[in-house]
Every structure is written in C-alpha cells, then in structure tokens.
C-alpha cells in the first residue's frame, strides 16, 4: 500500500438538483468499506455520483487521496464502479466486457489478457470467457461486473446497491466475495445500500444521509447507539 492514501474527502460540497439541495462534508477512511446508508430519496446515489464525477458540485471540493477531483472527468478519476444493473454489454462476451474495463479500445497485450482471465477466475467465472451476459444468471452477471472493476486495479471502488437485484442467498454470497476481494486489494470501498443488515455486516465505517445531508459519520458500533430518529427507523428499532 502507498503511504499517502488519505481516502475520500467531500469539502463543503453543495449541489442543487431540481428543487433538492445537497450539502456534504465528510472524510472517508482509506482502505475501508464505507457504507452510504439512508432512506429512499435521501441523496445516497447523489453522494456517490459526486465522487464518481457524474455530478459536479456547485461549490466545494471532492478529493481522492489528497488530489482535487472536483473538475476531473469521470474517466480520469482513480475509481471503478459496480452498479445494481451491472452495465454489461449484452452483445459482447465476458472476456470482452471485462477487457473493456482495462482498455476501452481493447488493445490488450498478453499480460492484460492474462489479467482479464485471472479476474474472471477470481470471481468464480473461469471458463465463462466466451459466454454473453444474456446466457448468465443475475449472480453470474454481477460477478462479471466485479471482475471488470477488479481488473482495473484502481484504489477506489464505488458500488451503488450492487446486490439489490439478487435473491437473498446470492446477496450473501456476493457480500462474502466483496469482503474477500477487499481483503486482497485493501482498496477504499464506498457502497450505497438501503439494507440495514448489509450495512451492519459489511461496513467498517458508515455515513448516514438524510434529506441531502450527512447526519452521521462513524463506526457501526456508534451507529447502532445513535439516538438520531432517522437512523433508528433505518435500523428498524
Ligand atoms: N438530476 C436530478 N434532477 C432533479 N432531481 C434529482 C436529480 N437527481 C436526483 N434528484 C432528486 O434528489 C433526491 C435524491 O436522489 P438520490 O438518487 O441521490 O437518492 P437515493 O438516496 O440514492 O435514493 P434511492 O435509495 O431511492 O435510490 C431525490 O428526491 C431525487 O428525485
């Protein structure tokens, strides 16, 4: 691991979308899994989109490992992404889909091709290289999306409800896969989730968003003891 990993900072970030105002101030630890939790419509995806670069703040700054990302194009940020709907190209086989994570022009040398096969194998999809996404189960497609993120070897992994479309058994398998990939890569993970069980099982750090603001940032232990009513509702207390 490099010495100067300081994680993700949102410094006095302000954004207005339609009639909704967002204000985010946060410091997210490097090398940990941080969950962004909150009710539907609270602003979880918006926060993630600000880090990914799909939204640009009206004011304030977004930093990753100390570098100002605020005006940097999403493709130039040191992040990889996994979404609920996995965004695989249906007409391309898995090898190509994962290879695109490495190089959009697909000019892959022998080492890059090996990396693609290793990533598929790491998520349990060895031998699936020539299969196209429509021939796979939902869980297999989501594994392929993880392989595509993995192969990029970026210091930050952004996940937006990555398991939401899966049934409970698969959700728990994928959660285990995420934890084991995280142990290996020690990357900084930011994961949107509206599932209290998932948040408590996976996160080492939690941000809770309510009405466009972060109303809690801290450990799962402190989160459980919080007396904020929106958090108690979220935890089903
Ligand atoms: N481009 C936009 N224009 C106008 N309003 C927007 C836009 N994007 C998001 N919003 C609004 O901002 C609020 C927060 O949206 P966001 O998607 O961040 O919430 P969320 O917490 O991720 O919700 P969910 O759990 O339902 O996905 C919502 O009320 C949404 O309608």
Image (spheres, rainbow, N blue to C red):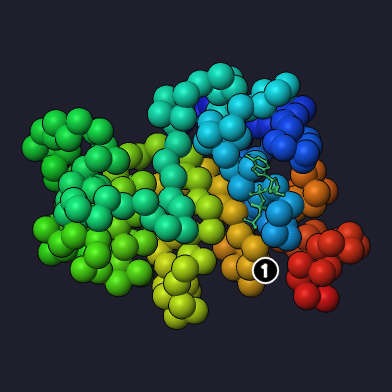
- Name the one closer to the observer, 197 or 104: 104
Residue most toward the left? 110
Report if residue 47 is visible in the image: yes
Q: Is residue 148 left or right of residue 17?
A: left
Quarter of the image for residue 46 reads top right
Residue assigned mark 1: 196
Report if residue 116 is visible in the image: no
Q: Is residue 136 left or right of residue 230?
A: left
> For the image shown, how many numbered marks are present on the structure?
1
Q: Position of residue 189 (x, y in %)?
A: 52, 47
User: Does 164 sit above or below residue 158?
Assistant: below
Label 1 Cα neighbours within 10 Å, binned few <14 / some 14-19 / many ≥20: some
User: Does 103 sit above or below residue 39?
Assistant: above
- Name the one closer to the observer, 15 or 146: 15
Quadrant containing the N terminus is top left
Q: Is residue 79 left or right of residue 147?
A: right
Q: Position of residue 169 (x, y in %)?
A: 45, 80
Residue at x 30% of width, y 72% of height: 137
Quadrant containing the C terminus is bottom right
Q: Position of residue 164 (x, y in %)?
A: 51, 66
Residue at x 77% of width, y 40% of height: 20
Quarter of the image for residue 214 reads top right
Q: Secondary structure at mark 1?
A: helix
Q: Position of residue 37 (x, y in %)?
A: 68, 57
Residue at x 80% of width, y 59% of height: 222
Residue most toward the front? 18
């Amino acid at each position: 691991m490099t010495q100067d990993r300081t994680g993700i900072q949102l410094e006095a970030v302000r954004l207005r979308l339609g009639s909704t105002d967002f204000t985010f101030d946060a410091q997210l630890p490097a090398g940990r899994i941080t969950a962004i939790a909150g009710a539907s419509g609270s602003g979880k995806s918006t926060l993630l989109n600000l880090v990914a670069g799909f939204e640009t703040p009206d004011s304030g700054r977004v930093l990753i490992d100390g570098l100002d990302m605020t005006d940097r194009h999403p493709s130039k940020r040191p992040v990889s992404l996994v979404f609920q709907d996995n965004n695989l190209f249906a007409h391309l086989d898995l090898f190509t889909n994962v290879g695109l994570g490495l190089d959009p022009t697909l000019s892959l040398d022998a080492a890059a091709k090996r990396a693609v096969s290793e990533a598929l194998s790491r998520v349990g999809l060895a031998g699936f290289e020539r299969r196209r996404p429509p021939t796979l189960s939902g869980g297999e497609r989501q594994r392929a999306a993880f392989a595509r993120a993995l192969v990029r070897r970026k210091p930050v992994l952004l996940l937006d409800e990555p398991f939401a479309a899966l049934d409970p058994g698969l959700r728990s398998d994928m959660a285990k896969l995420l934890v084991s990939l995280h142990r290996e890569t020690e990357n900084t993970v930011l994961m949107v989730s509206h599932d209290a069980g998932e948040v408590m099982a996976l996160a080492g750090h939690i941000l809770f968003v309510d009405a466009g603001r972060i109303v809690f940032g801290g450990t799962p232990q402190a989160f459980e003891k919080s007396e904020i009513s929106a958090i108690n509702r979220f935890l089903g207390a």
